[in-house]
Amino acid sequence: MSDTPINLDDLRQRIDQLDGDILRMISERASCAQQVAHVKLAQDKDAVFYRPEREAQVLRRIMALNKGPLDSEEMARLFREIMSACLALEQPVKVAYLGPEGTFTQQAALKHFGESAVSLPMAAIDEVFREVEAGAVNYGVVPVENSTEGVVNHTLDTFMDSSIKICGEVVLRIHHHLLISETTRKDKVSRIYSHPQSFGQCRKWLDAHYPHAERVPVSSNAEAAKLVKTEWHSAAIAGDMAAKLYGLERIADKIEDRPDNSTRFLIIGNQDVPMSGEDKTSIVVAMRNQPGALHDLLEPFHRHKIDLTRIETRPSRTGVWNYVFFIDFKGHRDEPGVAAVLEEVRLRASELRVLGSYPQGVL
Ligand SMILES: O=C(O)C(=O)C[C@]1(C(=O)O)C=C[C@@H](O)C=C1
């Protein structure tokens, strides 16, 4: 190893050389992406540029190839941003999310699409769906379940009245902090603002540390952070993005009761996503109101050894939808085993809709 640089100047010279190489290669990659865009347009004038299955494959391959010293998730995040910039060269992707700015849903949108995506806050889940349906944006991001607080019913219900498809999922570790502004009197906090789900996720911590503070539920954590700016006796529970956006100080970090607290978000769009190799499928099924209906519904999954990852029941809102089940399972609708199960379920159900097959979340 006689040529190994040993002093600071040598090491920095080596880093400069490597940066030059990386720069050339990223530029070459970006040119390739531009050519991909031409090929796609030549095949179809309404070509879809964002390809979730391909992005998942690229990130999984990078993680498998990585030998360190950066860990695989970190490396995939870097490639996530490179791909995001390449896609923006092909066509900037517009994403609506459940706002306001600074919510965990915005964080999830950026985690999934990268910082080059244009993200637009919407006031409600239905609005995210509407914007996607109307074609005003390419995709939407909505929360669907939290590991501590359970399902986001409103998201599931909105699927019942919509023809929107699920194109992807992203899971975000949720860390809550107790935040105050420069005008807050730290020792006089008597009111805490947050989203009801976040109060649920921090219940034990709040009971132990602020048992007498009034808990005021608001429509989002970002809204809570905004309110704190104007009141000297208030604090908010929110995440990093909201803290940075409103310039708040954290007085207690990671106050969620469960360290593995995470939320799953869905990417919604108008596109059917091809197989990526590691996929999930989401369906909504209505069964007739008769004994054994749930058993009849689940039996084909068991027989074909299909791995169910979630099942939720929602009250139906029409005569036909007596029982409505939302089911997620591993596999893609184009795989023969999955196609066979879907066929059997279709015969037993009064209604079946495949909401989408999509790559399992990578990052
Ligand atoms: O492979 C493609 O279809 C591309 O457009 C290239 C690329 C990439 O940068 O690797 C960019 C955007 C797509 O979402 C997927 C991959």
Image (tube, grey):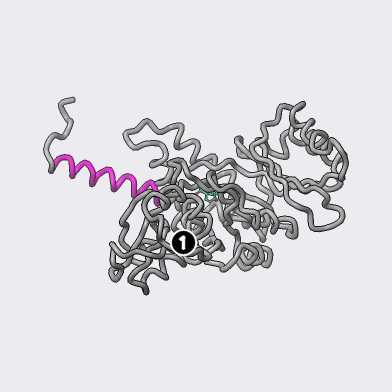
Q: Amino acid at mark 1?
A: Arg
- Residue 361 visible, this orientation: yes
Residue 86 appears in the picture as rendered:
no
| Residue name at image x 87 percent, y 56 percent | 319
- The percent position of residue 206, horizontal first and vertical second, equals 41, 52
- Above-or-below relation of 339 to 142: above
**Residue 136 position by quadrant:** bottom right
Q: Which residues are magenta?
A: 9-28
User: Which image quadrant for residue 193?
Assistant: bottom left
254 vs 117: above or below: above
| Mark 1 residue element | strand
Using the image as rendered, state which of residue 25 and residue 141 is in the foreground.
141
| Residue 27 lies in the magenta stretch | yes
User: Secondary structure of the magenta portion, mostly?
Assistant: helix
Q: In this view of the protein, which residue sits in the foreground, 244 or 92?
A: 244
Look at the numbered disc 1 and say if its residue's Cβ is closer than 8 Å to ligand 1: no
Residue at (56% x, 51% y) in the render: 265
Tally of numbered tags: 1
Tell me where residue 83 appears, x and y as whole percent. 47, 50
Q: What residue sits right under mark 1 in the picture?
A: 215
The x and y percentages for residue 167 are 63, 50
Tag 1: Cα neighbours inside 10 Å, few (<14), some, or many (≥20)?
some
Residue at the extreme front: 212
Where's residue 89, x and y in %? Answer: 48, 59
